[in-house]
Amino acid sequence: MSATAPVPVPETSAEPLVRVRGVKKHFPITRGIIIQRKVGQVHAVDGIDLDIYPGQTVGLVGETGCGKSTTARLIARLLDVTEGTIEYEGKDITRLSRRRMRPLRREIAMIFQDPYASLNPRKTVGSIVGEAFQIHGLPGGERMRSPWVGRVARLVAPVIALGALVIAVVAGFSASIEVPLPLPFGLLGLAIVVEILRRLLVLPARRRWSRKVRTEVQRLMELVGLNPEHYNRFPHEFSGGQRQRIGVARALAMRPRLVICDEPVSALDVSIQAQILNLLEDLQEEFKLTYLFIAHDLSVVKHMSDSVMVMYLGRIVEIAPGETLYVNPKHPYTGALLSAVTIPDPELAAKKRRIILEGDVPSPIDPPSGCRFHPRCPRAQFPVCKEDDPRLTPHHKGQLAACHFPLEDRAVIESTA
Amino acid sequence: MAEPLLEVRDLTVHFPTDDGLVKAVDGVSFSVARGETLGVVGESGSGKSVTFLTVLGLIDRKSATVSGEVIFQGRNLLELSEEEMQDVRGSQISMIFQDPMTSLHPYYRVGEQIVEAIRTHQNLPKRDAWQQAVEMLRRVGIPRPEERARQYPHEFSGGMRQRAMIAMALSLNPDLLIADEPTTALDVTVQAQILDLIGRLKDEFDASVVIITHDLGVVAEHADHVQVMYAGKIAEYGTRNDVYYRAHHPYTWGLLQSITRLDQPRQERLRPIRGMPPSLIFVPPGCPFHPRCPYVMEVCKTEVPPLLSEDGTHSSACHLTLAEKERIFEEEVAVKS
Amino acid sequence: MGRYLIRRSLFLVLVLVIVSFMTFLIFYKLPPGDPARIAAGRRTSPDIIAQARENLGLTKPWYIQYGRFAKGLIPCCGMFLNEQVYFSYNNFVPVKEQVFDRLPVTIVLAVGASVIWVLIGLPIGVMSAIKPRSARDRAGMLFALFGVSAPVFWLGYVMLYIFWFQLSWLPGSTLPIDETLFESVLRGRFILPWVTLSLTFAAFYARMTRSNLIETMSEDYIRTARAKGLSERRVIFKHGLRAALTPVVTMFGLDLGILLGGAVITEQVFNLPGMGHYVVDALATNDFPAVMGVTVFAALFIIVANLVVDVAYAFLDPRVRYT
């Protein structure tokens, strides 16, 4: 059902950084009295192949329910696949255990859409960005020493003191239980000694560590254009654009190779979007990052991506490099998407080839038969489109489209280039 | 020139808060002609929504200081009593909002909510009102409207909900429809459907439309006149072509330069407007845009530029001379073809 | 919905079993004192005690003992609270009789109080919510604070003191035996108990209604309703309150369910022969079958109330559907 043809290969690299083959993700729907039986499933992602080459930006575009966010989470292994394989740097990571996956989490980072919801409002900026270091250690490799020792040590003295208190109370009130007088005082003394030792031995190392983390975090904050002195501020004290910068800083903390950007600018004001997009581009160049860029705004994707994939109802319906998608779309859905995007130029907009779709996106619980797009497609022909699920077939210049009757060679929008 | 349908003169809306006085709308004057579509463009904090909420009297007069005039059909709406405004709302001026998910009451059927709007203003028996509601749903393109009218909002998709809102807003044939970010929460293909629908219905119902949005593309395709707002004031106003092909305000230039566009080849870098959107409490003195303006002059820091019209209806609030504006636009902003 | 009801009913049975078993454990296996001895009375001999032990089945293993009680949980075929097992140690009457005797008093008390607390609490909450931070609002919330803080027993005695002892406007505590329940109600003997019991709840409900309504009024659909030109009254009641009340209805069902198991303190203060009073007496005298009987009854009320409330929720909020 899914094609084996990969994304167009850029001239430089040979091996893809990420290779996805035949991946499906189905969410079960259950009903039942006591025992829940599966009565259906949501075909969020239903068989996709994609390759991401190092240094590239791959754009993933689609509307609600197309599966692009689910795809992002599958690649980041925040979700497990129902079927298919995901390879990272040639290794199969599809079913890696949590423990095995952990070192890879340094290399795959994610930036989320909602700068208001994706930051824990109870943590300071420094804590949010620096959290990765607590888990993985600093980029130089240094780790926090025995975090558990510190946590347990903090409890020992208070627990002993509490024990002393309890014994004292019991002794005081109970006639029957005999308690030697020195016992509670001795315990209290012990607690004091333990606490002193802790402050002398354990804390300094902890403080040194915290300082190192702080330096690194402030470096990151400067990198993304935030004032490092705001280290101790909380998310609600920042604007939307700044919060998104925090998200970027957090993603970059461990110097990842792959950054998955899930609609990073959709929730931002127009004038701030440009700032964040520029930032992402600068960072990509400086750190040789690879991006999977997910958005519903085609113009943003066009600006950022080297190649673009269009998703519909859990499938990839068109793949094209660079400008080709915009100049020469082949799949009618792509054509409709392009036609729907508004252009801030009245005359060009008037000349746009208009393809307005009927109805709404169908539910991924029960996708249409044959070509999933056939109920809304202005070019659908029966019975072919209703019975035959088209595969991704190549067109010119590395472009693939899954359609029996692709669009002719004519731009939807007349580009000025 | 025919008399405008709606004329707003020197509207000011200030909210006293614990942090200070929020000057949401600060001296705004414009008009909406009969049968036209006005696009109001601005980012968050520009005052675009508050302006029109005030027109409809939906701003609580006890928590806001409102001054100015809103002339509609010969009356100043700001001076009307609450009952008189309730007459106007829904039947002469209607408003639809951004998020159709939450704008409909989840407990009542869609048909019931439309019927409620109808029967508030017209003395129709329930059955007739229901028929009218179903008919409106049909006119906005909802298939099987009889069935759909009996359903609850959560059974509708996003696009359909917005259609239902439009149906409700137009059910009493208002003269003016205000659409506050009607498509922001919707998918791109659905956006196109809804904007198309609004355009079509505007003609069928012979109404004027105000589209409030942050999307310059929406306004380019659907508006006759465009009004750009910034920090509670109008930065620029003109016809569609004026604003896109002859823009005269640095903020407009900034917006045009910073957005990603499908109609242009992939640029190396976008040119964002530097700085951050202004606080409405600590509004910069003089021109509110001056801290972010690449062409700022001394006078901009102290004097508020008035909204002046240099040629016909095209006006901008900027201290630069007309010649300078035209030159800068030509050299730096205009899209080269 | 059918499936859901079946599932809930099965849970109901499960919960009843667990509750009864735990009660059994607490009172039967762990208490001080010997049930046989208590049952046998004051002046007995070891033989009679042993006989009593035999009769009460105390010699049998614990699961058989529990089994006998469990059989009494089945609400049909004359088995419910059957007399062989559920026989009061104290009064030597079947528990069933006593419970059904006292149930009406508790019902009258609970239902009357609930009506009053709704009639007081909701309007106060609405008034407060319409104009937050106004004088009206502060007065309402002051009342709520008082109602929540005043302990029931204190309130009860204060009421008795003022309205019966000093002013003689209302009758005092106790229901005379020669009056029917109906007559008692008519004579106003329930007024003070109703007011006492309802005050705390009224306070809670006022606060809850207020906060729910304030939250609801900031929703988008309220803005839409105003934009349609609806009168403010209609907006508040038909749109705002309708949505805000859903959780209040849920709470009401639960509160009523709990009260039907016996409003213990109020019944004590006013000496009303209801289930609460009964169970207190039974506890004091280790009358285990009585305790078991009332506990099971109360549990039944609460579980059923729970179920009714959940089902009602589906009717109130069309977004909620149970499979």
Image (cartoon, coloured by chain):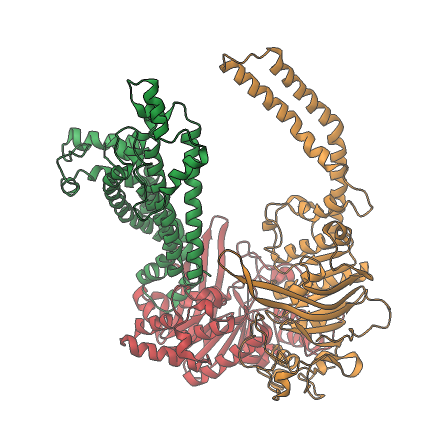
* Residue C43 locus on image (x, y percent): 28, 17
Total numbered labels placed on residues in the image: 0
* Above-or-below relation of B87 to C253: below
Q: Is residue A369 visible?
A: yes
Residue at x 76% of width, y 70% of height:
B268
Quadrant in the picture for the N terminus of chain A: bottom right
Colour in which chain B is drawn: red
Describe residue A20's horizontal placement relative to residue A164 as left or right: right
* Residue B68 locus on image (x, y percent): 41, 65
* Residue A379 locus on image (x, y percent): 62, 87
Residue closer to the observer: A134 or C107: C107
Q: Is residue C138 visible?
A: no
Residue closer to the observer: A327 or C305: C305
Q: Quadrant of residue C52?
A: top left
Which chain did the image draw in orange? A
Residue at x 68% of width, y 67% of height:
A24
Quadrant in the picture for the C terminus of chain A: bottom right
Residue at x 48% of width, y 62% of height:
B25
Colour in which chain C is drawn: green
Q: Quadrant of residue A333?
A: bottom right
* Residue A123 locus on image (x, y percent): 62, 45
